[in-house]
Each structure stands twice: as structure tokens, then as C-alpha cells.
Amino acid sequence: MEEGGSRGRDSLEGGIGLNQRKEAIISIGHKPIVERIAVATGRLRISSESKNAIQNGLVQKGDVLEASTVAAIQAAKETPRSIPHCHPIPLESCTVEWDWDGDDLICKVTVSAHWKTGVEMEALCAVSTGLLCALDMVKSIEKDDTGQYPNTEIHGIRVIQKQKGNGQV
């Protein structure tokens, strides 16, 4: 291979050459600062045994909802570290709510900021990480005899509300 040549990505179908310039972070300098709010939700399907352990403080690793709330908040704040095209946004609030629907643990996160771009990715990142933390804490209960998780599932992660300024967008 020639010196300075790229290898691999430019040969992939639909890939880009590493030497091609791409706008990695979209310019938002021209946009006005307005209030932005996003609400996301997701679910973790677990066994009745795991649900009981969470509700009764019997999980060996500790308080699942407390730890998962902290994980969700931290994820919202650190979203640009995980998703490279996201702008760093000065978040003003992040609320994390937990609920149950049968054996589904539901996480709902609301994020807000006054900024030039939306906060949907922060809300989605927070929900995903909160649910992953909860799963990590109960995975020893969730395993079957072969060490698999046949009935455990994170699902339904989506933005349920987005607001820009005084109205919905």
C-alpha cells in the first residue's frame, strides 16, 4: 500500500474514504438559543423473580433503581462522548422516572436545555443506559441454566415527546 493511502473503509460498499472531508458536527452557529425538551422511554422485560428482587431490595449489587437513575443522568450528560456527531449541550435538567407494566421495568427520561439544537439523543442515551444498568444488576437472576438470557429484553426505546420553544416540534 502506498504511504498515506487509506485502507478498508473506502472499499466498503457505501463507505467513505478516510481522506474525504465530511462535516462531522453540523454547524448550528446560526440557530437561535431556545428551550428544548425531549422525553424518551424504554422497557426492560425481566422475570418475576428479578422484579421481586428489585422491589424488595434483594439484588446483590444494591438498589437497582437508584444506581440506574444515576447511570441515566450521567449518560445524558456524557452523550457526545458516546455519539460522536452530537454537540455538547449545557443541560439544565434531567428527570428519570421508573414504573412497572407487568414484568416490564419502564424508564422515562425528560431532558431540557436552552440551546441551539435538540436534546433527543441525550434522552435516548439516558433511557438506554438506565435500562442497561438495571439489566447488569439483575443479570445473575435472569440467567437460565445454560447462562443465557432467553426472556430478558430491552425494547421500545423511543422519543415520545419533543418540544422546541413554546410548542411541540
Image (cartoon, rainbow, N blue to C red):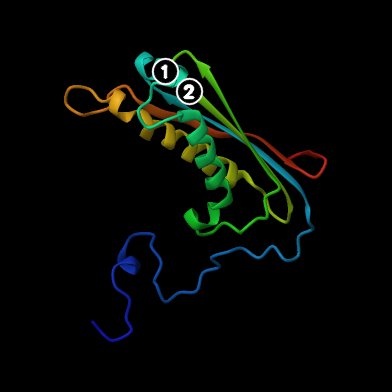
Q: Mark 1 points at which residue?
A: 51
Residue in the picture at 52% in, 25% down:
106
Q: Tell which of 7 and 90 is nearer to you.
A: 90
User: Which of the two labelled residues, at mark 2 and mark 1, occupies the earlier sequence position?
Assistant: 1
Kindly report which numbered mark, 2 or 1, lies closer to the viewer in this rendering. Answer: 1
Q: Position of residue 75 (x, y in %)?
A: 52, 46
Q: Residue at x 55, y 34 (%)?
A: 158
Q: Is residue 10 above or below residue 83?
A: below
Q: Give the number of the disc on residue 6.
A: none
Quarter of the image with the C terminus in it:
top right
**Vertical side of 158 occupied by 125: above or below:** below
Report which quarter residue 29 is drawn in.
bottom right
CA neighbours of label 1 inside 10 A, class few (<14), some (14 to 19), many (20+): many
The residue indicated by pointer 2 is: 105
Q: Residue furthest bottom?
A: 3
Q: Residue at x 16, y 26 (%)?
A: 146
Image coordinates of residue 134 in percent, x first then y, are: 43, 31
